[in-house]
Image (cartoon, grey):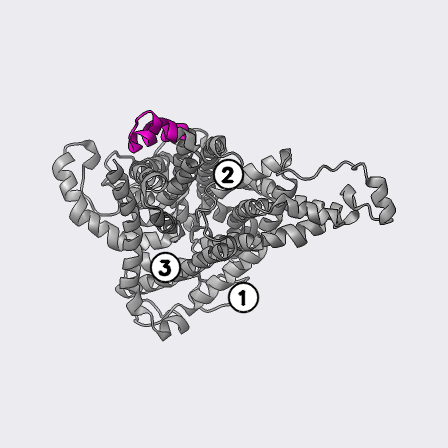
């Protein structure tokens, strides 16, 4: 039976290797300068790139982080500092439940909140949808990291006459900073690859735009369009875009891991 | 970790005397009050968000709810032109694809968790755990592309023919296999939920006291017997919670399933046939919903999906909390 569980572990790792391997094998050959700096060309023509999608991904994800991170970190601090009562329990439970909410549901929720009243699709609505997905996750990891800070640090600060809020921000949050940062990177990595919540909010855009009130393309949306489209040229670009997106997510995930390791030694 | 007591400590008067006007230890100065109020406000955003989600979805789904009532859940006609909507095929497809995914993912994920906590050499633990958790970092849409161009051709050439040769007489393998099918959707879902189930199971197994293990070994059990008769039963609630958590993920997964399951409004037991899921229906049809009733029907689908996943997740969390109380188990999994 030991052999069986070893083989099962091998199979799981093999799946990862197969996916990443195919991404590199099928996508790497299409990565050239024009892929990164050109915009898409009309269907049927060859060439073109995904510059609009790369910039769009950065804007939408960046804006989502700007909205989601402060709320998530604040909620996490609340849970760690004041979260022992009934409200804390409720918030913690809601965060865990929201963490598993289907992203497509958050997408149509953002549609009713922002797209319908505004009358048109926008990158802003997409960012809000992504932020909604991000907050519960950031909140829980922040809480966990803050709780790791030894109690003696807090007591020392309070004994020196620091008010509680300064203790919390200057001593506790600062000590846990690397851990909180890790949680943030993991959160950003997770939303960077999201597609479903953007389908009816950011929508996608064939042209280059930096206006957050306009529909905007992202790598994930572009991969969906190209991957399910009828042209071989599109499939080629879909693989290349998938490789780029995967690279972006991997860099964020590895950075998160590195931030933990440099602070706490080997993660458990 | 509880916060310090808020009541005035015995030395309060002395503290006031030392720093006039700054009763720091009371926790009642303006800065503290503001800080606490600000954090509470931010924390309240989550429950409010949950309420807003339910209210918005319900309000948008209301026309369809009042029009179709419970028929919406168990009838199969989905005809936007005639304005008749029944979501039974999607509900069936969602549950069927998720259960199929669990069938593949549970042995795999539990195998990974048991191997890593009980048997693997120490140097292998971190790398393998990291690689398995990386599966959760792969975007859903990338799974979709991989599924279309790698998994489906592989299923068609190397899996379905031998499977048919052995089990072709069962009702589960009838019909022509075009590629996009319940099977393809189930397999991709399985790969996607393995990291979640494995990560949570691993933390649950790590939380089992080693005295359990030692007791079984001391009674003369082999290492595998110790795991199977002492460690796994001890963590059972948490392991079931992990599986239910994986189920919750599978139910709500959208992009990869949309790209692979075939998107056909039909209820059938053959895994080789196309099916549909609730998430896929919303993804495919939301932007082409031309009538208010059609849109409302899709919102009702979203509401049903939301309620199911919330219920499943809540159940999973309660079970995991029973074993690993209060920790954010699984949130470390990406």
Real-space Cα separation, disc 1 to disc 3, in angstroms: 21 Å
Real-space Cα separation, disc 2 to disc 1, in angstroms: 34 Å
Relative placement, left or right, of B107 versus B248 is: left
First to last magenta residue range = B214-236
Residue, disc 3: A223
Under tag 1, what secondary structure? loop
**Subunit ID for the residue under disc 1:** A
Q: Quick one: label 2 or label 1, which is nearer the N terminus?
A: 2
Q: Is residue A100 above or below residue A238?
A: above
Real-space Cα separation, disc 3 to disc 2, in angstroms: 29 Å
The answer to whether the residues at label 1 and label 3 have Cβ atoms under 8 Å apart is no
Where residue A192 sits: x, y (%)? Answer: 45, 57
Occupied quadrant, residue B41 = top right
Q: How many marks?
A: 3
- Which of discs 3 and 2 lies nearer the camera? The answer is 2
Under tag 2, what secondary structure? helix
The answer to whether the residues at label 2 and label 1 have Cβ atoms under 8 Å apart is no
Residue, disc 1: A211
Q: Nearer the viewer, residue A6 or A139?
A: A6
Residue, disc 2: A97
Where residue B62 sits: x, y (%)? Answer: 52, 36
């Amino acid at each position: 039976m030991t052999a069986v569980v070893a083989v099962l572990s091998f199979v799981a790792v093999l799946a990862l290797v197969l996916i990443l391997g195919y991404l590199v094998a099928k996508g790497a050959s299409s990565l050239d300068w024009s892929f990164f700096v050109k915009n898409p060309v009309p269907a049927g023509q060859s060439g073109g790139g995904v510059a609009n999608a790369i910039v769009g991904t950065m804007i939408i994800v960046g804006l989502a982080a700007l909205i989601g991170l402060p709320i998530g970190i604040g909620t996490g601090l609340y849970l760690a500092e004041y979260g022992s009562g009934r409200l804390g329990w409720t918030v913690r439970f809601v965060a865990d439940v929201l963490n598993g909410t289907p992203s497509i549901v958050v997408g149509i929720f953002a549609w009713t909140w922002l797209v319908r009243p505004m009358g048109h699709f926008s990158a802003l609505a997409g960012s809000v949808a992504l932020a909604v997905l991000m907050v519960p996750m950031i909140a829980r990891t922040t809480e966990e990291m803050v709780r790791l800070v030894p109690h003696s640090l807090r007591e020392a600060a309070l004994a020196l006459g620091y008010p509680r809020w300064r203790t919390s921000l200057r001593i506790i949050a600062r000590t846990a900073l690397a851990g909180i940062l890790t949680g943030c990177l993991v959160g950003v990595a997770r939303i960077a690859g999201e597609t479903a919540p953007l389908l009816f909010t950011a929508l996608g855009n064939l042209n280059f735009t930096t206006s957050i009130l306009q529909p905007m393309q992202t790598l994930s949306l572009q991969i969906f369009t190209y991957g399910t489209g009828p042209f071989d040229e599109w499939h080629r670009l879909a693989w290349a875009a998938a490789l780029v997106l995967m690279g972006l997510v991997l860099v964020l995930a590895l950075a998160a891991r590195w931030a933990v390791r440099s602070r706490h030694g080997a993660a458990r | 970790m509880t916060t310090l007591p808020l009541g005035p400590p015995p030395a309060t008067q002395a503290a006031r005397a030392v720093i006039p006007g700054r009763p720091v230890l009371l926790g009642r100065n303006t800065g503290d009050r503001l800080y606490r109020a600000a954090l509470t406000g931010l924390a309240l955003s989550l429950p409010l968000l949950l309420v807003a989600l339910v209210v918005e979805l319900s309000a948008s789904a209301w026309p369809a709810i009042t029009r179709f009532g419970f028929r919406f859940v168990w009838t199969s006609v989905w005809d936007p032109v005639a304005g008749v909507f029944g979501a039974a095929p999607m509900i069936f497809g969602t549950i069927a694809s998720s259960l199929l995914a669990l069938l593949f993912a549970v042995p795999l994920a539990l195998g990974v968790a048991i191997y890593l906590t009980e048997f693997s050499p120490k140097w292998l633990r971190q790398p393998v755990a990291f690689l398995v958790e990386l599966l959760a970092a792969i975007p859903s849409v990338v799974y979709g592309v991989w599924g279309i161009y790698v998994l489906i051709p592989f299923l068609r050439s190397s899996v379905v023919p031998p499977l048919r040769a052995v089990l072709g007489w069962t009702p589960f393998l009838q019909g022509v296999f075009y590629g996009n099918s319940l099977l393809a959707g189930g397999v991709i879902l399985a790969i996607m939920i393995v990291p979640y189930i494995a990560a949570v199971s691993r933390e649950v197994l790590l939380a089992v006291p080693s005295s359990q293990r030692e007791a079984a070994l001391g009674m003369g059990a082999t290492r595998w017997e110790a795991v199977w008769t002492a460690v796994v039963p001890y963590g059972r609630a948490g392991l079931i919670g992990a599986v239910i958590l994986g189920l919750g993920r599978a139910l709500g997964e959208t992009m990869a399933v949309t790209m692979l399951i075939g998107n056909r409004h039909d209820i059938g037991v053959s895994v080789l046939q196309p099916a549909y899921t609730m998430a896929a229906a919303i993804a495919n049809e939301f932007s082409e919903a031309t009538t208010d009733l059609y849109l409302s029907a899709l919102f009702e689908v979203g509401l049903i999906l939301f309620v199911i996943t919330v219920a499943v997740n809540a159940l999973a969390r309660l079970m995991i909390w029973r074993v690993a109380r209060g920790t954010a188990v699984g949130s470390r999994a990406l």
